Amino acid sequence: MPHIEPLKPDEIRDPELLELIRRGEALGVPDALFPRILARVPAQAKALLRALLVSHAEGNVDHRLKEIIRVQLARTAGDPYFGGLRSARAKQAGLNEEEIAAGSGKFENDPRFSAAEKWALRYAREMYLNPENIDAAFYAEGKRHYTEAQIMELGAFIAFHYGMQAFARTLGTGRAATAA
Amino acid sequence: MTEADIDDGIAHYAESPRFTEAEKLALRYSELMALNPDQVDASFYGELRRHYSEEEIVELGAFIGFNIGYHTFFGTLKFYPMFAPDGRLVGQEESARIYGAAPASLVAAKK
């Protein structure tokens, strides 16, 4: 049981919040558990869920790559909740567990990833393990593969999801489960 | 609020007379989430409940998580405030000199 009890479904009545929870459930990230905890503060829940969904499922960076990064971040954050979730859209696009595991492992030598993808995976890994390595030279390398808009999209996605994972870890939500 | 409040809140909150027990616990929540998340366990949440409602705890936790994520990202971008502590609009080079390479007390910057 999480350390903060989630609201029951019938305790949530804000239509916008309900729609955001539905969108998360349809995507698979997040399932209803984390949103129902956030729902205790509806205004913040809506802003945070909207940002989670937009940063993950929209934009100009490949969603499959973002999904690999998202799980890598959850493993860095030590969060089994977000680490156990999978994007239905990424799965439909062919993403499998082997690729996800590769993105969290020794991706630098893995031929399945392009140079651009390796940079993005390194960006996510280094951001919270060795942020001092993300310097001007690192960003210059990124600009060889991505536009500045894409780099900001990636950076903001990484920042936002890692922050929520850091919070989720402390909630003791554990392995994601369909909320009753 | 003063810079001294901020400095104490970062470095010496546990023994500082500036903060209530509830505030010290919130500061500890923030510190532990960033540096030692294993210590934010059921017992810690129980302690939080002595001072805060469930809604306030969720608000605090989400706020802290959000800031943990974003401050690390922003730190890699190497940009600085647009205004000096005295209110002048400054360029990024001057701002970098004022605010320094890492977050620090603004007491020296104001002198």
Image: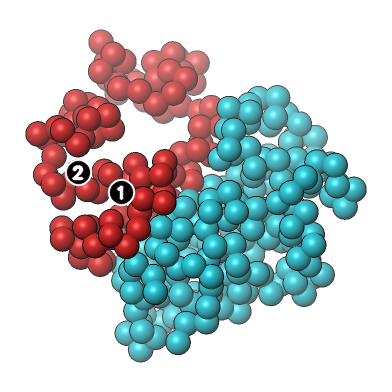
Question: Extreme top residue here?
Answer: B111
In the rendering, at what x and y percent does residue B58 appear? 32, 62
Which color is chain A depicted in? cyan
Pick whichever, A105 or A18, lies toward us: A105
Q: Where is A75 relative to A4, above or below?
A: above
Task: Identify the image quadrant of the C terminus of chain A.
Answer: bottom left
Q: Would residue A42 be seen by someone viewing this image from the given angle?
A: no
Identified at 36% across, 50% down, the residue is B39
In the rendering, at what x and y percent does residue A153 appear? 63, 49
Which of the chains bears the disc numbered 1?
Answer: B
Identified at 56% across, 40% down, the residue is A128
Q: Crowding near pointer 1: few (<14 within 10 Å), some, many (20+)?
A: many
Q: Where is A129 relative to A2, above or below?
A: above
Q: Crowding near pointer 2: few (<14 within 10 Å), some, many (20+)?
A: some
Write down the residue under mark 2. Answer: B24
Task: Identify the image quadrant of the N terminus of chain A.
Answer: bottom left
Q: Would residue A71 be seen by someone viewing this image from the given angle?
A: yes
Disc number for residue A74: none
Label whose residue precedes the other's in the sequence (2 or 1): 2
Which color is chain B depicted in? red
Q: Amino acid at mark 2?
A: Lys
Write down the residue under mark 1. Answer: B29
Identified at 60% across, 44% down, the residue is A155
Which of the chains bears the disc numbered 2?
Answer: B
In the rendering, at what x and y percent does residue A109 appear? 85, 42
Pick whichever, A93 or A37, lies toward us: A37
Residue A122 found in image quarter: top right
Pick whichever, A95 or B28, lies toward us: B28
